Every structure is written in structure tokens, then in C-alpha cells.
């Protein structure tokens, strides 16, 4: 919301539903509360979901055989501490037949994946014998 602040309540104890700020926007007054409601799950704004055509070859036999993924698909690597999630993520990034890898990680996972990014410039790939 943008506009001009019309009113701010002084410091004090208020219920979270109380409008603590009023903003005027285009002649209309909008109340701002101490909380916001956001949907937990909202559908992605897409016209069509494309069907996968090409398999993602991970060069990890267990993953390719038991958990196949198509290129452009989505995969997750769940598991407990120390079970090899980062090793699998790094191997997929280095050796799969993909052109782009989008990795979402936070905290220590993000730090570990940064290690792979430093290795990328030194990797060589053979595609169709070239």
C-alpha cells in the first residue's frame, strides 16, 4: 500500500486487529493493522503445466532407476543429518544432463552449495562426443 499517512496511534497496548496507522490513497482511507494475512498455499500463475519430455539423467543409478525426474521438473532431497543430501545435490549439479540447476537452500546448505559454484568453472562435459 502506498499513499499519505493520515494517522498513527501513540505507543501503547493494542489488539493485533486494531488499525494502528491510517493511510489515505486516492481519497480512500486504508487501515494498517499489526498483522497481515497471507495465503499459506496459492496456485502458481501459469496457463498450462507442460508435460516432461526428456529424462533428467543424474548419472546416479539409484536415482535414475527408482526416482526418475524429467528435465524441467522438481525434486527434493529429504533426509536426516549426515545422510548425504549435500553430496547428492552436488553430484546432480555437476554430472546431470541439465543446462541449468536452480538450487534453493538456506543456512549451512547454502554454504555447502557455494562450494560447488567454485568448482563449476573447472568442469568439462562431453555431449554427443564433443
Image (spheres, helix red, strand yellow):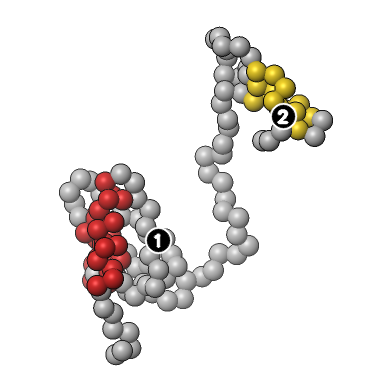
Is residue 47 placed above or below 52 in the rendered structure? above
Tell me: 114 left or right of 5. Answer: left
Tell me: 51 left or right of 79. Answer: right
State the residue lying farthest toward the front. Answer: 4
Does any portion of residue 121 appear in the rendered image? Answer: yes
Is residue 116 placed above or below 1 in the rendered structure? below
SS at circle 2 = strand
Residue in the image at 26% along x and 63% along y: 118
SS at circle 1 = loop
Tell me: 15 left or right of 125. Answer: right
- Pinpoint residue 105: horizontal percent, then vertical percent: 34, 50
Tell me: 62 left or right of 98. Answer: left
Q: Earlier in the sequence, mark 1 or mark 2?
A: 2
- Pinpoint residue 94: horizontal percent, then vertical percent: 27, 69
State the residue lying farthest toward the bottom. Answer: 129
Where does the N terminus fall, quadrant-wise? top right
Residue bearing mark 1: 102
Residue bearing mark 2: 4
- Most foreground residue, 90 or 44: 90
Where does the C terminus fall, quadrant-wise? bottom left
Q: Are marks 1 and 2 in contact (CB under 8 Å)?
A: no
State the residue lying farthest toward the top. Answer: 12
Q: CA distance from mark 1 to mark 2?
A: 40 Å
- Pinpoint residue 122: horizontal percent, then vertical percent: 24, 72
Residue 13 lies in what quarter of the image? top right
Residue 68 lies in what quarter of the image? bottom left
Amino acid at each position: 500500500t502506498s499513499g499519505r499517512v493520515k494517522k498513527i496511534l501513540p505507543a501503547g497496548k493494542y489488539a493485533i486487529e486494531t488499525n494502528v496507522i491510517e493511510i489515505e490513497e486516492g481519497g480512500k482511507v486504508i487501515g494498517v493493522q499489526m498483522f497481515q494475512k497471507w495465503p499459506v498455499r496459492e496456485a502458481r500463475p501459469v496457463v498450462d503445466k507442460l508435460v516432461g519430455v526428456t529424462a533428467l539423467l543424474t548419472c546416479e543409478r539409484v536415482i535414475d532407476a527408482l526416482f526418475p525426474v524429467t528435465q524441467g521438473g522438481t525434486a527434493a532431497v529429504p533426509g536426516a543429518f549426515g545422510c548425504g543430501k549435500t553430496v547428492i545435490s552436488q553430484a546432480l549439479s555437476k554430472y546431470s544432463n541439465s543446462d541449468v540447476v536452480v538450487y534453493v537452500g538456506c543456512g549451512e546448505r547454502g554454504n555447502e552449495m557455494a562450494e560447488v559454484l567454485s568448482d563449476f568453472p573447472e568442469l568439462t562435459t562431453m555431449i554427443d562426443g564433443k
